[in-house]
Amino acid sequence: MAEFGENNKSAVGPPVADWKAASGGGGMSPETPVSNGNCTVKRLQKQPSCESPTWESAGSDSASKAIPRRSSLIKDGSRAGRDRKKTVSFSSSLSEKKISSAADCIHSMVEGIELKKIRTNSRVYQRYYLLDAGLQALCWEPSKKESDKARISLASIREVRTGRNTETFRTSGVYEQISEDCAFSIIYGEMYESLDLVANSAEVANIWVTGLRYLMQYGKHALDMLASSQDSLRLGWLEQLFSSAADSDDLEEDVEGLRLQLAVKLIRSVNPGVGGGKVELRFKELQRVRTSTSGLTLENESGAKDPGENKRPIGRNERVIKQDFIKVFHDFCTRPEIYFLLVQFSSNKEFLDTKDLMRFLEAEQGMAQVSEETSLKLILSHEPSEEGRQQGYLSLDGFTSYLTSAECHLFDREHDGVCQDMTQPLSHYYISSSHNTYLIEDQFRGPSDISGYIRALKMGCRCVEVDVWDGPDGEPVVCTGHSLSPPLLLHCVLDAIGRFAFVASHYPLIVCIENHCSVQQQQVMWQHLVRILGEKLYADPPYEGKSYLPSPHALRNRILLKGKKLGPGGEDGEVSEEDEGAEMSQKIKAANSGGAAPGGNEKEMLPKSVTAVPPVPLPPKRFQLLKELSDLVTLCRSISFIDFPTSSKSQNPWELCSFHETLAVRLAGESPGDFVNHNKHFLSRVYPSPMRIDSSNMNPQDLWKCGCQIVSMNFQTAGLMMDLNTAWFRQNGNCGYGPAACHHAAGGVLFQRQHQRHGAWCVSAAAPCQGDKRPEPAQAEGLGGQRRRGGPLRVHRDPRHPGRLHGAPHQDGDPERRQPVFDESFEFQINLPELTMVRFVVLDDDFIGDEFIGQYTIPLECLQPGYRHVPLQSLTGEELPHAKLFVHVALTNRRGGGKPHKRGLSVRKARKGRNYAALRDLGVRAVDEVFKMASPPLRDATDLRENMQNSVAVFRDLCGVSVAANLMQCVLALGSRVSGPDGAPLLLFDLRDHYPALDPQGPLPDVLRRVVSTYEMMVQASRAVIELSDGIYDRILHIQTMAMEFHEKLQTLAEKEGLRGRKVSRALESFSWNITILKGQADLLKHAKAEVQENMKQVHDAALTGNLTKESIGVKRVRSQTRRGQG
């Protein structure tokens, strides 16, 4: 994370964010609030002018300016009556030693610590572990063993493995209670025995893993080697930085060091997130300690001491010496989790060279086409030291700079622009929509403001609402009828729409006109529309023969009017009136008449229990519609919904129905299949329930699941639902359009799709462990509190960091919500990635109700794998400065659940309990015979796919990596344990064939023989997928084509078979289900073939990167074409 609050900056933010310009930092000008100018209609007043002096400021600031709103359902991030700075600190206290080098790790290990030892019988033993003074053995006590047996020689250690990735861990009965980030194993001896340990925190586990790996590489002389060479890049850079600042200091030259405030400013210029007050306090603490030590020395030498000598106050001009400056920089700008990550990929060096960085980018960040030139460019961009840039080395500060830069943002920057197909019919897209756009607070008495339109349009909204009523002096006004909200002049609203319609997006804007005007004022309305919107209005009549609407691409920069329309060839005539506010008014009146006392104030008149009032159907009103106004409505004609059969028979593609929330949710529950099929052909608009008088929002995903394209949101109300809506449309360049998931299925009900990607989504917020890293938030100063040894990171008492999925039903027991503390990994399994969003929330658990601190919501499709930072946002969507979570993300195509050892079954055993896709009987003999032909190829497809996936899982387990690791990570991990006694590798890959072969280079121990046999099984299963998948795929699609020939006459065939009523409907649903199964299984088989090809490329690349290849002619590096590595 980082810090929250303006003055309390992060103790450890991006350490070299501005090292090229140490004095950098630009301020943001304060935002100017948006007002209506003279566009508000005041009662008993003459018509005002429409000139608004705030248009330009509105255009620049209104999108980000928080708009006030009232909501009983959304908690504000601030607490009235409490003026306090919220600060949190995850940094160590003054007395705590921060780990910033391998030497610190080794010293900590010599001191020793209690660790838990896991045995195969699921027993757990608490033991005190430490290194002996000679750095030659690992010892533990107490133990019943003799002292010489309760030790492991460091020379016998073959591997230090992170996570719960040994057989002992996987088969342990306490597996689920062990944190992945706190577990590690020491593999030692000729028989590859394992000592499986669990630390009380991820940081302690990292200390031991790092220290042991250094000792394995450098032996008992590790400390001497580290003392002579450690941190040379960083130290040289800091000395140069200090000397340059000292040379520019304008005080007398004979005084050593820098002025205190200049030293503080220098550290903050390098690391803007550091809190100046805390840096100054640390400097003064060091000065007091040094002065006290100096005084004691003088006292010992002379036997007397000046009593006032050490009581001299430390002023702002106090000098800071170089050693103190370097120490304070280490304390505030060293992030242990990033240091542990660096040393893992640097082969136990204090820096990354180009090959190390290339391996990190490929294996962890999922980058393709990486070369040493790519690594060198990153080094030149992020390494602060001149020496490092010249030698091609990336120091800890450069690595931190890279990980906190925009290149490592969680959001995939490919989605910053329009990246999805925009040539499909308009009804095939979700459309960002606003409800009662002119309101900026509640629905009944909240103020109206033009800034509501400006803000919504700048946020990418593509459907706004304009309720038009007769106004004074013959001028139409915009307001909510039957409410106390003040009106706005229509021509001012249209002026705002015309100015900002295509600022954020060039795709079509739908303006929903709810017309309540007389014919005279309709004439004025028509004149305003034509004059202000002009050529932007789309008025071409629809083509009668077209079965679909035009595409968003074809309608760019055009405004579509949604409203009532006269019948063909008619003059001015009556149509039914749309009045979405009438039901709200009726409920309020009913509630007030039952409990409001005469003369009661306005607050008492607001309903407190309107849910008890049963809804009374309102008879539709009729009104006279002007023909010229009717002619402006072309592609979005409003009609009333009767039922789905009526719509399928008589509704035209350019006609749409509006549903209030209650009706839409009921239809989604009772007839989801019909609703989905309806939305494949027609636009559907859903507006909030009239009961949402406080402008609270419904969950748009509940309606998106059924394909409803236009789900209107109250943009003025911040909170979870609005965050989901905003995040969803970010995935397509924030253009306001996104492909609807229901149109990806071939005739199936969205809830019943079987060709979805079953994937385990793994994301963590924990300190990194070598192997499958799990990072913690960037250290911060903000929210009051500090890190406590052995416990979670806390805000006062407990900052909870819930990670939550929002979308279709999941397969987990508690599917949607996880509330981990920091240093904890967590995993989700996803059924419908197209509609899934991930939401990170940080809450302050010190207060009743869990006070909101920050959040970030992102579509699953936009997640980047690897080590990423998550910028937290405020309740109203503004990014909090220096407030970030640091996470590791892994996405896999793995199916199933349970412990890893259950997934590691042999192919033969797994097939016995395998679930095969089942087709349904329709009761129509001819069609059922066709579908029965599909059973054998469907079983073959499932066997091919799952045999391959199971064999990969077994190989992954033997490589000792997590279930989320890809094959590149598996091979790289394997490379660390295949060295023989003479240092030569015992296993090498032969890359001359398309399927790399793993060849022994001599006698192998049992564990490596198992690795070879498992790898051969994986290659065999992968080869079967490549060789057989195309034939099975063609057979499945051929059967699907044969079945689709019955589609048009299916109802007639069913009736001939004697099916009637509901049985016919079930037959149609079963037909759609079967078609979906066939298409889905074919797609899964196609994805499995692509997965195999990707796996073989990853093995090939990893063998080259890890120097595990035989010398052969013509071996070239094959680069993966997919951007993200997948396991």
Image (spheres, helix red, strand yellow):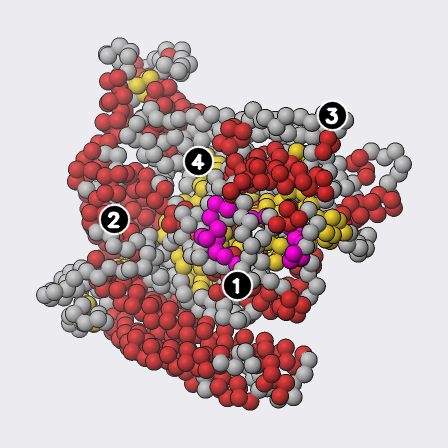
Instruction: Determine which residue is flagged by label 1.
Output: 546
Q: Where 410 falls versus 1116 (above or below)?
A: above
> CB of mark 1 within 8 Å of CB of mark 4?
no
- Residue 829: % across, % down: 48, 63
Question: What separation in Å lies between label 2 and label 3 (alpha carbons)?
Answer: 70 Å
Q: Are marks 4 and 3 in contact (CB under 8 Å)?
A: no
Q: Is residue 1081 visible?
A: yes
Residue indicated by mark 3: 45
Residue 567's label in the rendered image is none
For the residue marked with disc 2, what is the amino acid? Answer: Leu
Placement of the C terminus among the 4 image quadrants: bottom left
The residue wearing badge 4 is 882
Q: Is residue 104 above or below residue 1104?
A: above
Return the residue found at the far left. Answer: 1113
Q: Is residue 1116 left or right of residue 624?
A: left
Label 1 amino acid? Answer: Lys
Q: Start and end of the magenta stretch? A: 548-569
Disc 2 target residue:
357
